[in-house]
């Protein structure tokens, strides 16, 4: 069983739409959770950390549900520049290793 | 200048050749990582190091070795390259330097990647 699973998509949405991605993780002792963004042929970059209470950064909202072991990312008012692959990342309880999902592809259409 | 650099950026080699990929960082971070990325498989950890005397195997270390020559340098070697090692390789760093919170301490900073093709 994979440590982290994501729907690969692709998600094709019009500008201005709201889109949500989910990610599930298998290790109930996982401690830290993140969403990274990766543009085509580029390196991943941190989009936001995910906190237990949920957190928001502008148009982006991240939620964590420990009971169901899933993480979500909500993007409101999608922009063309949001087109990318979004990676769900989970840190093990020892803090030593990070597990990456395969990524969810988003294309925002004019 | 980029904080995390990788050389070479692209490499084509033949089966059986020895290849070294290099990573350097100016972030002052103690932790460094090597990942490979394959379509449909995401990023998978090959090796990681917490300082020059600490090397640890990751999820897929077979066929690879690493060297932490200094805090700022972490090299990945393929002793005898094979075609299924064709992938995009990323180096990453993480550390206390510059961290203002637990969240920023846990952030990983990636190099631009090395695209390796083994024929």
Image (tube, rainbow, N blue to C red):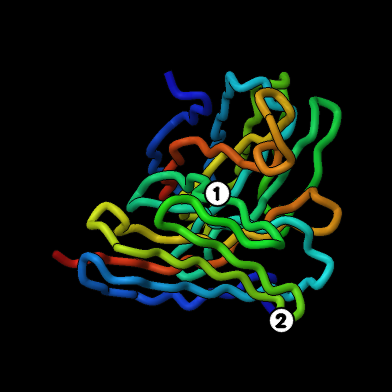
Task: Tell which of B81 and B44 is nearer to you.
Answer: B44
Crowding around mark 2 (Cα neighbors within 10 Å: few <14, some 14 to 19, many 20+) is few
Contact, mark 2 vs mark 1 (Cβ under 8 Å): no
Q: Secondary structure at mark 2?
A: loop
Residue A110 at x, y = what percent?
Answer: 13, 64
User: What residue appears at the point 50 percent right and 35 percent down from the top-left corner?
Assistant: B111
Give the side of residue B55 with respect to residue A60, left or right: right
User: What residue appears at the point 27 percent right and 52 percent down from the top-left corner?
Assistant: A81
Relative vertical location of residue A61 with respect to residue B63 in this rendering, above or below? below
Residue B29 at x, y = what percent?
Answer: 69, 26
Relative vertical location of residue A63 with respect to residue B98 in this rendering, above or below? below
Q: Is residue B62 visible?
A: no
Residue A14, numbered label: none
Residue B90 at x, y = what percent?
Answer: 53, 43
Residue A68, numbered label: 2
* Chain letter behind tag 1: B
Relative vertical location of residue B78 with respect to residue A82 in this rendering, above or below? above
* Chain letter behind tag 2: A
Q: Is residue B64 visible?
A: yes
Q: Secondary structure at mark 1?
A: loop
Quadrant of the image occupied by residue B13: top left
User: What residue appears at the point 57 percent right and 24 percent down from the top-left corner?
Assistant: B24
Give the side of residue A8 with respect to residue A108, left or right: right
User: What residue appears at the point 61 percent right and 56 percent down from the top-left corner?
Assistant: A34
Give the side of residue A54 with respect to residue A19, left or right: right
Which residue bears the numbered disc 1? B81
Task: Tell which of B92 and B20 is nearer to you.
Answer: B92
Nearest-to-viewer mark from 2 and 1: 2
Crowding around mark 1 (Cα neighbors within 10 Å: few <14, some 14 to 19, many 20+) is many
Task: Please identify the quadrant where the C terminus of chain B is shown.
Answer: bottom left
């Amino acid at each position: 069983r994979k440590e982290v699973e994501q729907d690969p998509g692709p998600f094709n949405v019009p500008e201005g739409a709201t889109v949500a991605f989910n990610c599930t993780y298998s290790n109930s002792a996982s401690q830290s959770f993140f969403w990274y963004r990766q543009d085509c042929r580029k390196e991943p970059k941190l989009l936001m950390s995910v906190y237990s209470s949920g957190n928001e950064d502008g148009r982006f909202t991240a939620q964590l549900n420990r009971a169901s072991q899933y993480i979500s990312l909500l993007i409101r008012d999608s922009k063309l520049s949001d087109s990318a692959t979004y990676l769900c990342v989970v840190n093990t309880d020892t803090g030593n290793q990070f597990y990456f999902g395969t990524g969810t592809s988003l294309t925002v259409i004019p | 200048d980029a904080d995390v650099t990788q050389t070479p950026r692209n490499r084509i080699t033949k089966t059986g050749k020895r290849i070294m990929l290099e990573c350097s960082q100016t972030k002052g971070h103690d932790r460094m990582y090597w990942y490979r990325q394959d379509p449909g498989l995401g990023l998978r950890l090959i090796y990681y190091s917490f300082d020059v005397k600490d090397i640890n195997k990751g999820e897929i270390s077979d066929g690879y070795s690493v060297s932490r020559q200094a805090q700022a340098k972490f090299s990945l070697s393929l002793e005898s390259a094979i075609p299924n090692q064709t992938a995009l390789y990323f180096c990453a760093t993480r550390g206390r330097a510059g961290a203002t919170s637990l969240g920023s301490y846990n952030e990983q900073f990636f190099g631009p990647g090395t695209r390796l093709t083994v024929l």
